[in-house]
Image (tube, rainbow, N blue to C red):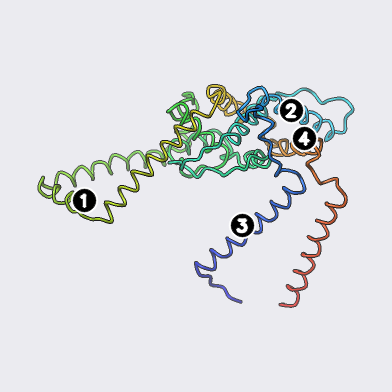
């Protein structure tokens, strides 16, 4: 059996895993109704964002959540009232992102592509990392390029709206906890910063004025480099225009920012955080079932899909057995 693997084979393996995951996700979306687009429910008759309709949709989600809790616990009466702040604030931020997504390229992270469907909300709920606010603050402050999912996406919108980093909303206790946990790593990164700047300054001092002028002349005479710089400048202008257009279209900016800060405070302190993604999934299940968009209880569609999967599994079993 082959033990070595080339880079090409490794990339092919990862690509096929992603394709399989995409197909399974597509199947889940078709059965569950998660691929249903909800944008018309949060826009007015003119196709513009409606705060009133958005709050009404969130109310329907929260009502479904309360029903799901009762069904899960098998009680006739509703369970003890729990704080729904994390659900309301999360749903608000996720819906706002999906309704008016950014089209520019972030300097810090890869922003997710959304389709305007319920599945976009669930994907955000399933990607709430890092797991605690100390780690989140560290990555936002020192390694933003490694963040992804909900927090990275909302950080980007918050920064474009306010022109400041969301880390400035952290209190002193959070910063002290973060610096204490990551003390060695922070000390190393903060030390490398001044050393790099000092090295660049020394290099400039070593070059005479004539050498600097000659270097600039060669740069501008390099046609390919000049064209590259021109294209970069054009792309920067295009990105800035997209950001400006988005800011003009994104309504209720202060509400979005306050709801995001509220979620950040309440999520990490909630005793229900461990089941949060499951709760969002279940409330979406019930909403989609009520709307008639879910096919899970449609016997013809569900069992047809199940039969196809079982048939594929048996065929793979036979092929695997024949190779052994």
Whether label 4 touches label 1, CB < 8 Å:
no
Labels 1, 2: front one: 1
Which residue is most to the right? Answer: 76
Labels 4, 1: front one: 1
Distance in Å between CA atoms under marks 1 and 2: 60 Å
Distance in Å between CA atoms under marks 2 and 3: 33 Å
Distance in Å between CA atoms under marks 1 and 3: 44 Å
| Front-lying residue, 242 or 28 | 242
Image mark for residue 18: 3
Dot 2: element: helix
Distance in Å between CA atoms under marks 2 and 4: 10 Å
| Front-lying residue, 253 or 212 | 253
Identify the mark nearer the N-term, 1 or 3: 3
Quadrant showing the C terminus: bottom right
Image mark for residue 62: 2
Residue at the spot of label 4: 287
Residue at the spot of label 1: 220
């Amino acid at each position: 059996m082959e033990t070595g693997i080339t880079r090409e084979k490794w990339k092919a393996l990862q690509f096929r895993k992603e394709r399989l995951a995409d197909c399974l996700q597509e199947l889940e979306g078709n059965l569950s109704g998660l691929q249903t687009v909800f944008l018309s429910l949060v826009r007015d008759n003119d196709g513009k964002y409606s705060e009133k309709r958005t709050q009404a949709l969130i109310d329907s989600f929260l009502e479904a959540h309360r029903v799901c809790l009762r069904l899960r616990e098998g009680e006739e009466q509703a369970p003890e009232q729990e704080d729904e702040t994390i659900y309301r604030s999360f749903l608000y931020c996720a819906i706002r992102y999906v309704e008016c997504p950014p089209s520019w390229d972030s300097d810090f992270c890869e922003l997710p592509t959304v389709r305007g469907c319920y599945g976009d909300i669930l994907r955000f709920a399933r990607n709430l990392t890092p797991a605690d606010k100390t780690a989140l603050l560290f990555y936002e402050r020192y390694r933003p390029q490694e963040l992804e999912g909900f927090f990275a996406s909302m950080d980007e919108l918050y920064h474009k709206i306010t022109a400041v980093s969301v880390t400035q909303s952290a209190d002193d206790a959070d910063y002290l906890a973060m610096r204490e946990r990551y003390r060695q790593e922070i000390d190393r990164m903060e030390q490398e910063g001044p050393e790099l700047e000092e090295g660049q300054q020394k290099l400039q001092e070593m070059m005479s004025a004539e050498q600097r002028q000659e270097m600039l002349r060669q740069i501008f005479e390099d046609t390919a480099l000049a064209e590259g710089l021109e294209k970069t400048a054009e792309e920067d202008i295009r990105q800035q225009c997209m950001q400006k257009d988005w800011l003009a279209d994104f309504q209720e900016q202060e509400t979005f920012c306050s709801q995001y800060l509220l979620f950040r405070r309440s999520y990490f302190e909630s005793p229900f955080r461990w089941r949060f993604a499951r709760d969002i999934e279940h409330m979406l299940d019930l909403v989609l079932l009520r709307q008639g968009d879910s096919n899970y209880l449609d016997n013809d569609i569900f069992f047809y899909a199940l039969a196809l999967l079982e048939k594929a599994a048996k065929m793979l079993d036979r092929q695997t057995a024949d190779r052994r």
